[in-house]
Image (spheres, rainbow, N blue to C red):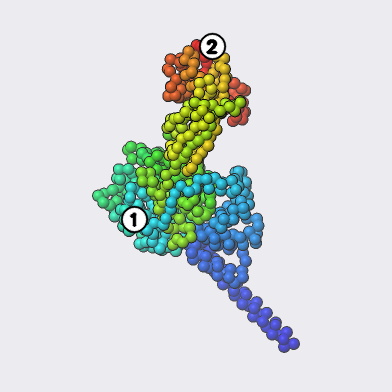
């Protein structure tokens, strides 16, 4: 009986204690939620973890702990809480599939990561590429850089803001005046190094008690675009949730300092705008924003024209680069190669650095590729800046053995490729001796030439990888053929097959019937790289048959107005003719270049008729009508 009394007494005391504990816990959680809402993640985490340490299990707390660590790029810790979240409640908002999948990559658990990321992208209606495929591509792109930690790092977060020759501008919290609730570090300022190993204060009015970030300086050194918290004229701006956003400001050089600070017109206190970069001719400003209008999600990269009078055009979303997640830190080198950081493209983990080359003819960016290891890692890698003349640059990373975010220096290795192969006859496989073989760059200009040996073999030694994209073989009585390839250090082998044909060419026939028409992209008049191979064949026929004279006829599909399509078809005809002239076809062999718009469709796809894209594309073509033989 005494024993039972003690048990009852203990139960009453425990019940009373739990009631008090619950009330205190509610107060703590409300305090933590308020700090979390205000992005004060460091303080929020302390409270949440204290509550959890008392044996309390709650999906909401797990998600917020995961998010707090995730937003501070601590993927190992974030992954632990997301794992608990999914164990407690497997059905979560779709965004958690993405975040947990990214955290798993930091531990190189790629197969498990595939499970969550595949769920995420399929819910958005997007295709997902398995890690077994994209990791292979990343490894092929790896090894082109040597990397070492820079000597300018502080104990806080540092990253490169801009590179001009040897003058590196650094974003650092080294002398920060205020503590940032987000990560507990001081606010960041802009410094520069002047080629030294020391951070030098930036003179002028750029730095404030609040955060300054990445920047871009015009080629003449007179104008700086830089990122700053919404702070101007001693006034701090906030959005409707009382959160301080980012804006881009412009500064003018005044002797050896910077002043005359002006806010750019497309900023807003309701969303962030930052990370400025300039095109090679300073006519385009690139930047990052989380503006929901026209956004693909997360933060997107935008561009805006800078006019000669100092005004700006309308910002345009660069959809080619953007994903449902985050694209950040754009940078453009002197050749207009575009670099940026992203966690939405196929990556090793965290933010990876990606690049895309520009087609100098149509000024459109081509395929996006991951720059590979060792620049990229399973952690955040970002803020890539590069001097093309020296092949040196910098980036930032929070990979292991860093203080927070540290700056790394890199040298880009010279890539030399040997291109070897044989020339064969298409049908019989017979080796073709003395064929004329050429290496071409991405603009189809000849770099080197050689002649295949008696064995049909050809060799080009130690060619710069940056220079070469195609290999072409041609010989009289054969149709020229051209292959594209991705150059890499070492040797590339290409076997080129040539088709021997006996041409039966009569007046009013179409040379394209012997091969195929030349096709165009929607609303474009430039010659596509894959169509240049076919045009080379047309050029070969004309050059080898100097009596043939042709008329070029170009066409469009039915979309857009009749008047617009007529002008578009004329541009296609002129582009086709110009290309043939550049390849050596005498002007006397092309009688005319005429555009017919949409007046000669070859299928049912006229105005208002629903058609697949493949059907429309059949009408976007150039033909070569023989008018004299």
Residue, disc 1 = 191
Viewed as shown, does residue 609 lie left or right of 159? right
Regarding mark 1 in the picture, which secondary structure is present there?
A: strand
Residue located at (46% from left, 35% from top)? 460
Viewport quadrant of the N terminus: bottom right
Q: Residues within 10 Å of mark 2 (few under 14, many from 20)?
A: few
For the residue carrying disc 1, how many other residues have a C-alpha within 10 Å: few (<14), some (14-19), or many (20+)? many
Please name the residue shown 56% across and 16% down the image: 503
Q: Which residue is mark 2?
A: 507
Q: Is residue 249 above or below residue 23?
A: above
From the viewer's perspective, is residue 412 above or below residue 593? below
Figure check: 622 above or below 158: above
Q: Is residue 53 visible?
A: yes
Name the spot of residue 607 as percent of width and height, x first.
58, 24
Which residue shows up at 43% across the image and 15% down it?
588
User: In the orientation shown, which residue stands out farthest toward the front?
Assistant: 454
CB atoms of marks 1 and 2 within 8 Å: no
Q: Residue furthest bottom?
A: 2
Work out how far the residue at label 1 is from the one at label 2, CA to CA, in angstroms: 72 Å
Where residue 19 sits in the image (x, y, percent)? 62, 74
Q: Nearer the viewer, residue 380 or 606?
A: 380
Q: Quadrant of residue 441?
A: top left
Quadrant of the rendered image containing residue 210? bottom left
């Amino acid at each position: 009986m005494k024993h039972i009394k003690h048990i009852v007494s203990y139960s009453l005391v425990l019940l009373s204690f739990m009631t008090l504990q619950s009330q205190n816990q509610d107060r703590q959680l409300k305090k933590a939620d308020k700090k979390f809402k205000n992005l004060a993640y460091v303080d929020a985490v302390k409270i949440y973890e204290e509550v959890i340490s008392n044996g309390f299990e709650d999906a909401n707390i797990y998600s917020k702990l995961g998010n707090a660590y995730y937003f501070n790029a601590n993927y190992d810790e974030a992954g632990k809480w997301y794992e608990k979240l999914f164990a407690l409640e497997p059905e979560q908002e779709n965004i958690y599939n993405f975040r947990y999948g990214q955290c798993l990559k930091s531990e190189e658990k790629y197969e498990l990561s595939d499970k969550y990321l595949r769920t995420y992208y399929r819910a958005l209606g997007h295709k997902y590429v398995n890690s077994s495929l994209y990791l292979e591509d990343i490894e092929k792109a790896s090894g082109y850089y040597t990397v070492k930690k820079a000597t300018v790092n502080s104990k806080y977060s540092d990253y490169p803001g801009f590179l001009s020759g040897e003058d590196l501008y650094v974003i650092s919290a080294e002398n920060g005046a205020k503590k940032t609730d987000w990560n507990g570090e001081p606010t960041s300022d802009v410094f520069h190094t002047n080629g030294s190993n020391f951070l030098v204060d930036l003179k002028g009015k750029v730095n404030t008690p609040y955060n300054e970030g990445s920047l871009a300086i015009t080629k003449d050194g007179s104008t700086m675009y830089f990122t700053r918290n919404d702070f101007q004229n001693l006034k701090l701006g906030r959005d409707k949730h009382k959160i301080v956003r980012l804006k881009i400001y412009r500064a003018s050089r005044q002797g050896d300092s910077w002043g005359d600070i002006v806010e750019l017109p497309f900023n807003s206190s309701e969303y962030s705008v930052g990370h400025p970069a300039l095109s090679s001719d300073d006519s385009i400003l690139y930047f990052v924003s989380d503006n929901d209008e026209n956004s693909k999600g997360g933060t997107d990269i935008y561009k805006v024209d800078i006019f000669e009078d100092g005004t700006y055009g309308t910002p345009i979303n660069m959809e080619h680069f953007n994903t449902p997640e985050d694209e950040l830190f754009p940078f453009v080198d002197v050749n207009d190669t575009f670099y940026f950081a992203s966690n939405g493209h196929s990556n090793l983990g965290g933010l990876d650095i990606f690049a895309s080359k520009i087609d100098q003819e149509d000024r459109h960016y081509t395929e996006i590729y991951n720059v590979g290891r060792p620049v990229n890692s399973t952690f955040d890698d970002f803020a890539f800046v590069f001097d093309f003349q020296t092949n040196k640059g910098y980036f930032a990373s929070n990979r292991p053995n860093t203080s927070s975010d540290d700056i790394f220096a890199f040298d880009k290795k010279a890539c030399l490729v040997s291109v070897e192969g044989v020339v064969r006859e298409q049908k019989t496989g017979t080796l073709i001796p003395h064929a004329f073989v050429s290496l071409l760059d991405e603009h189809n200009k000849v770099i080197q030439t050689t002649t295949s040996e008696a064995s049909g073999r050809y060799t080009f030694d130690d060619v710069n990888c940056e220079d070469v994209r195609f290999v072409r073989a041609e010989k009289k009585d054969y149709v020229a053929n051209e292959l594209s390839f991705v150059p890499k250090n070492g040797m590339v082998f290409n076997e080129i097959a040539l088709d021997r044909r006996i041409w039966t060419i009569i007046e009013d026939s179409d040379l394209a019937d012997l091969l195929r028409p030349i096709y165009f992209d929607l609303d474009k008049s430039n010659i596509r790289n894959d169509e240049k191979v076919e045009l080379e064949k047309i050029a070969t026929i004309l050059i080898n048959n100097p009596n043939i004279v042709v008329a070029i006829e170009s066409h469009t599909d039915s979309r857009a107005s009749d008047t617009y399509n007529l002008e578009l078809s004329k541009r296609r005809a002129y582009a086709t003719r110009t290309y043939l002239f550049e390849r050596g076809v005498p002007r006397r062999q092309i009688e005319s270049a005429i555009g017919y718009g949409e007046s000669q469709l070859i299928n049912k796809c006229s105005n208002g008729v629903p058609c697949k894209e493949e059907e429309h594309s059949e009408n976007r073509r150039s033909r070569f009508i023989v008018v004299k033989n």
